[in-house]
Image: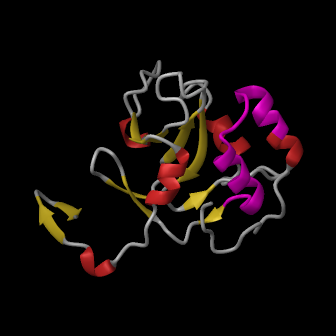
């Protein structure tokens, strides 16, 4: 289960909305569903993840299912990403820069089923989406959660290169 600063900050998960999500996408992976029901999203304590591509990712907030529209509500994020992500991808978390982590839903037999992907708004193609801004970061939701860690500010190296501020 993911660790959040204040579990159920916005109340318990809205089971009606959870049923709607499952009616649309099918059964959710059990570890994702149980974490969502237990915490209903929230700000992550462990906020870094190293993807299969070797890149470091910031995990700012896990989305929940709430009655009201809000930027950290799965329904709200899903509405804003309609026609911008494939139909079998479910946003479940975001970084601090407006990007989203997506769970590719489907059976394990389905190539990439239940894998975690990163949706980068800076690389989004204008017009008809080609999904080239979506990249796989991990093989499963459980591996994603297990791979989260707390950043060590002493491990960060910064430099200026070509007028850009680079953090390594």
Which secondary structure type mostly characterizes the magenta part of the structure? Answer: helix
- Residue at the top extreme of this rendering: 128
Q: In this view, does 100 lie above or below 128?
A: below
**Is residue 36 shown in magenta?**
yes
Q: Which residue is drawn at the image coordinates 77% and 55% (left, top)?
A: 37
Image check: 14 left or right of 159?
Answer: right
- Residue at the bottom extreme of this rendering: 154
**Is residue 34 shown in magenta?**
yes
Residues 139 and 133: in front is 139
Residues 123 and 17: in front is 17
Q: Is residue 23 above or below residue 58?
A: above
Q: Is residue 4 visible?
A: yes
Please provide percent x and percent y for residue 125.
40, 28
- Which residues make up the magenta segment? 19-41
Q: How many labels does the image show?
A: 0
Please provide percent x and percent y for residue 31.
65, 49
- Residue at the front extreme of this rendering: 109
Q: Is residue 98 visible?
A: no
């Amino acid at each position: 289960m993911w660790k959040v600063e204040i579990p159920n900050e916005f109340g318990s998960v809205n089971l009606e909305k959870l049923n709607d999500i499952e009616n649309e996408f099918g059964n959710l992976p059990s570890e994702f569903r149980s974490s969502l029901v237990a915490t209903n999203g929230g700000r992550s304590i462990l906020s870094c993840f190293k993807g299969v591509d070797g890149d470091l990712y910031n995990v700012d907030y896990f989305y929940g299912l709430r009655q009201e529209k809000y930027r950290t509500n799965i329904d709200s994020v899903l509405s804003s990403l309609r026609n911008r992500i494939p139909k079998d991808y479910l946003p479940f978390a975001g970084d601090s820069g407006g990007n989203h982590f997506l769970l590719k839903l489907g059976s394990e037999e389905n190539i990439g089923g239940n894998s975690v992907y990163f949706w980068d708004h800076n690389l989004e193609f204008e017009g008809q989406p080609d999904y080239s801004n979506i990249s796989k970061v991990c093989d499963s939701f459980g591996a994603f959660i297990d791979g989260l860690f707390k950043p060590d500010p002493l491990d960060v190296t910064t430099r200026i290169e070509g007028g850009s501020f680079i953090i390594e």
